[in-house]
Amino acid sequence: MTETTTTTAAVRVDHVSHTYGSGPSAHHAISDLNFSVQPGEFVSIVGPSGAGKTTLLRTLAGLLKPSEGAVWVDGKKNNGVPPGMAMVFQDYSRSLLPWLTVEKNVGFPLAESKTPKAERKAIVAESLEAVGLAGFGKRYPWQLSGGMQQRVAIARALAYRPSLMLMDEPFASVDAQTREGLEDLVLKIRDTYGMTILFVTHDIDESVYLANRVLVLSRPPAHIVEDIRVDLPEPRDQITTRENPDFIHLRGHVARLIHGGGETK
Amino acid sequence: MSTTSTRTLATRALRADGVRPAWQRALVSIAYFVIPIAAILGIWQLVVVLSPPAPFFPAPFAIIGNLWELLFGSDKAVQQVFVGEFLQTVGRMALGFALGAIWGVIIGTVMGLSRGTRETINPIVEFLRSIPATATLPLFIILLGGGDDMRVAFIAYGVSWFVVINTAQGVGSIHKTMLDLGKVFRVSPARRLFAIILPAAMPKIFAGLRIASTAALLLAIVSEFMLASNGIGYMLVQAQGRFQLLNMWSWMLALAILGLIINSLLEFIEGKVLAWHRLSRQRT
């Protein structure tokens, strides 16, 4: 893309390809991806299963060095994990440390920062409050339900005060009702803290419901089939938004793209 | 939240259902331990009393009495045995165990962290640990002489394998998400090691330490069979040589008690350190 704007993109993905292994057994996971995300945008990434969504997210997070191309976060080229980026993992039972209490888990990324101890405590309390878990700080993660554990993981990401939050199918393993609650929580948090969110999901409705933009990936080697703007009224609402004809049209459109293997247009 | 209340209800039901109060549970577990031992001692004592005199098998209560006399007898010279022999063995064992455990955790962690290192070191580890540790005692004597440093080194060497293998397994099997977590939040490598990797591997490491503690006692005694001038192993050989069978049996009893104490001590520490592990597994 041409750099005519004065604001730096929160994320810029520049001709990124990644291949696992080499020779005949090589797996070409993503191929020549190009897109930018503006600060404050909520972008969903959907695609057929095995479409390289996780590869893309790991590349964005700086956990994986792409075979080709580069990722720029906040105007700086990724070389390892960029600062100011937090991540919420799919597997909450493994991303929370079971030997630490909820509040120690939330404060875990802060322990090395120069923030004074009292302030850190305040940040932890505020983050737990923001996800509706005030008063659960002294519990252990395994004493909580799955949905609550994922709230703890979100609180930990918040406590880190990120400008960019990556979410890797965060609600894939919670039940439908809990899931709706968590979706609205994420939207509320985005409004309160004003951060950029990249949200990987395989749930088409979820991708449309949450986002300002949906990126539909093809089967591997994944490329972007369509970059769809979502102009549904804000704030989103679980009932009225999902009844909105535009929502129904968009989800149908995305579903057709994915079920067509991401090849039809 | 509805999920919370179901969970508390479930826990409450569980509590009401199967679990007795703490004192009752303690009593039951003591009974399970005491009754079989009392039965065996009773039968043994009875057989000795009823049968013709058997010098190789003294009566159990004679052994217990003799051990008490040996360790804490009123005679001041005899009481020195506790400090001069019993504690000697305990000291060597503890030092050897500690050194071997530290060394084992270090090597095991290095192996667990890097697949390359693991694949390079593994054949060497597998080969060396196939040599029975007791068989290396003559080599240790030639290399380090007959002193306490040799004994401690020998115990540490033999003990370390159990810790190496278990630590390598524990560290190597940590879930990728947990490792990613440290990287994503830009946690320093030292803190990733001490605050994520080692705690996560701790259940496995403890399993290794438990086996290692048993091995430490065994190796301590064997090391005192040769070129020693004190310690329980030395006293055993002395008693055997002088045909003091009652003493021999008493020292064997002392070792059994020592083993039990060490095991319960480790169990106690494990209960404290790994409470999260035990409890989190009960939940799922």
Image (cartoon, coloured by chain):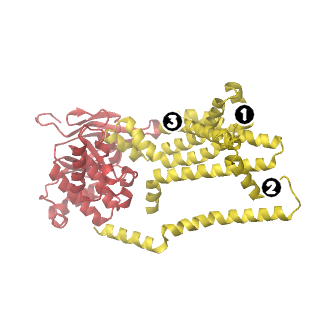
Chain colours: A red, B yellow
Neighbourhood count class around disc 1 (C-alpha, 10 Å): few under 14, some 14–19, many 20 upward: some
For the residues labelled 2 and 1, the Cα–Cα distance comes to 26 Å
Q: Amino acid at mark 3?
A: Ile
Chain of the residue where label 1 is placed in the rendered structure: B
Mark 3 falls within which chain? B
Where residue A222 sits: x, y (%)? 32, 45
- Judge left or right: residue B49 versus residue A84: right
The residue identified by callout 1 is: B229
Chain under callout 2: B
Residue A31 coordinates in the image, percent (x, y)? 32, 40
Residue hosting label 2: B58
Callout 3 touching callout 1 (CB < 8 Å): no
Residue A49, above or below B136? below
Tell me the mark number nearer the camera, choosing from 3 and 2.
2
Q: Which residue occupies the foreground of this view, A4 or B160?
A: B160
- Residue A205 sits in quarter: bottom left
Q: Are marks 3 and 1 on the same chain?
A: yes
Tell me which residue sits at (72%, 33%) in the image: B229
Q: Left of A104 or right of it: where is A185?
A: left
Task: Mark yes or no: residue B126 visible.
Answer: no
Percent across and percent down for residue A94 are 39, 51
Please tell me how crowded label 3 is: few (under 14), some (14-19), or many (20+) other residues with Cα within 10 Å. Answer: some
Q: Which residue is mark 3?
A: B106
